[in-house]
Amino acid sequence: MTELIITLIIVAAVLLPLIIILLYRFINPRKTPLIQAYLKQGKISQAIRTARQIIAREPRNPDAHYLLGKAYLEAQKPELALMEYKTVNNLGIFTGLCRETPFRKEIADLYMQFHQFDEALKEYLLLVNAEPGVAEHYFHVGDLFEERSRTDKAELYFQKSIELDPEFAEAYSRLGKILYRQKKPLEARMALEKAIKYNTDNTAAYFYLGKLMKEGHDYVGALINFEKAEKDFELKLKVLVERGTCYMSMNNYENAIAEFERAIRAAQDDGKSEIVYARYFLGLCYEKTRQFELAVDNWEKVYAKRPQFRDVAEKLSQYQELRTDDRIKDFLTASQPRFIEICQDIVVALRLEVRDVSELPNGCQILAVEAESKWRGARKMPKLIRIFRIPDLIDDSSVRALHEAMKKINVTRGLIITSSSFSRKAYEFAETRPIDLFNKEKLRELLATAEREHASPSR
């Protein structure tokens, strides 16, 4: 009898833990379907509570952690969801409800959401190995390599995604962008056109195709593509600046001004790079249309944000006379008829008589003769004078053009007067020819002399 009792105790000691384990494994799995049911019914709080209860009893239950992560996502708590997904990843068990491939897609998306790009890249590389025929995995890897400025790697993965899916519009678009930056216009254009072919709403492809056309001097084509890209809110400022520069290249300053002003009005941050460029180019347009005060106003705003930006400091220095010298201001901003009058007054201030006046782009040409001769009856010597009001340096080509004009009308003396200055080559050419060059400082003196003579009672 005693031996029987002992035997029963030993058997019970062995079987009882097994029975408990079997009962636990029989009862506990019914809990995870319950969590799934709660999730389907939208009972997120109950799903979270049930999942936590299971994890408290069985911390290494991957399905419970996975479903808890899903519940947190439904509760708009992605940071907590990522913690649970990381636990599942560390456990590395994918034999229950949590299947590896869908799980890796989900955790990769969460890593992307929290800008943990290195971790996301690891997941997508694992997906490439798990499903080598899925083009989307290669695209995501390419995207992440591009994010890390590894465009060589990104290009390869975008090309692979296109091989697997020849109609993958976004892959064509991203590849075209890389090829554009690599200065491969023909290859870039082919990729971008295919991106548009397979997705007519691909605004990024339109944008880079527009840039390619602009650089190829097809401004009309560029404007059409930029207009389609403008639908993208994130691209809008860049598009408006690009459209403005297209109109500038076409010498259509009125439309260019409108585009740059639209960009400035649309911006919430005046320090954005696009707005700095918009204000700088807007200043150039105002300069070209002789609205110098508006030009200076925009350049001052650029200088306040970026003092070293391009030649903005030089521009402000160049036009400082607008604020301090009314004579220079009138010379630069006068209407064309008034400008011609000012030029004739300058010639008179040089003790010359005006014989003929003609207009030039941004200036005028005057044929004059000496007002008085030292010798009675002596022939008055003619002089061909060109006066310019332009911001750029006068180069040697302008001096050569004057010299050729002098030869054609048999004039032996020439003079160029400018509101800017002259290049070194211009001075070198004039040194060996009968041509004088008067820069801004000399112009200021002549304007003062002309004003005094106007005020003289004898005038």
Image (cartoon, rainbow, N blue to C red):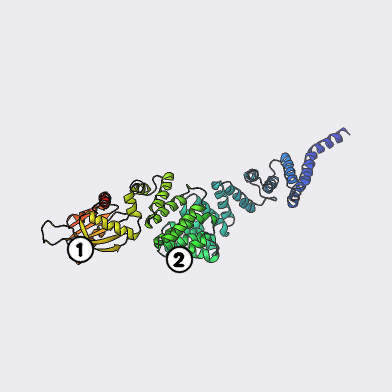
Mark 1 Cα within 10 Å, few/some/many (few <14, many 20+)?
Answer: many
The image quadrant of residue 14 is top right
Q: Is residue 132 visible?
A: no
Question: Which residue is under mark 2?
Answer: 221
Q: In what quadrant of the picture does the N terminus appear?
A: top right
Which is more toward the observer, 364 or 65?
364
Residue type marked 1: Met
Q: Secondary structure at mark 2?
A: helix
Front position in the image: 154 or 409: 409
Residue type at mark 2? Gly
Going by the picture, which residue comes out furthest to the right?
Answer: 1
- Residue 228, above or below 119: below
Give 219 or 408, whichever is nearer the viewer.
408
Q: Position of residue 72 (x, y in %)?
A: 68, 46
Sequence-first tag of 1 and 2: 2
Which percent across, then down, holds residue 423?
Answer: 26, 53
Would you say 248 lies left or right of 194 here? left
In the picture as drawn, the residue positioned furthest to the top comes out as 2
Can residue 405 be seen in the rendering of this structure? yes
Q: Nearer the viewer, residue 444 or 285?
A: 444
Disc count in the image?
A: 2
From the image, which quarter does the C terminus lie in? bottom left
Residue occupying image coordinates x 56% and y 46%: 116
Q: Which residue is mark 1?
A: 406
| Crowd tier of the residue under label 2, counting other residues whose Cα lies within 10 Å: few below 14, some 14–19, many 20 or above | some
**Gap between marks 1 and 2 measured at Cα:** 43 Å
Secondary structure under the numbered disc 1 in the rendered image:
helix
Q: Is residue 327 above or below residue 353?
A: above
Mark in front: 1 vs 2: 1
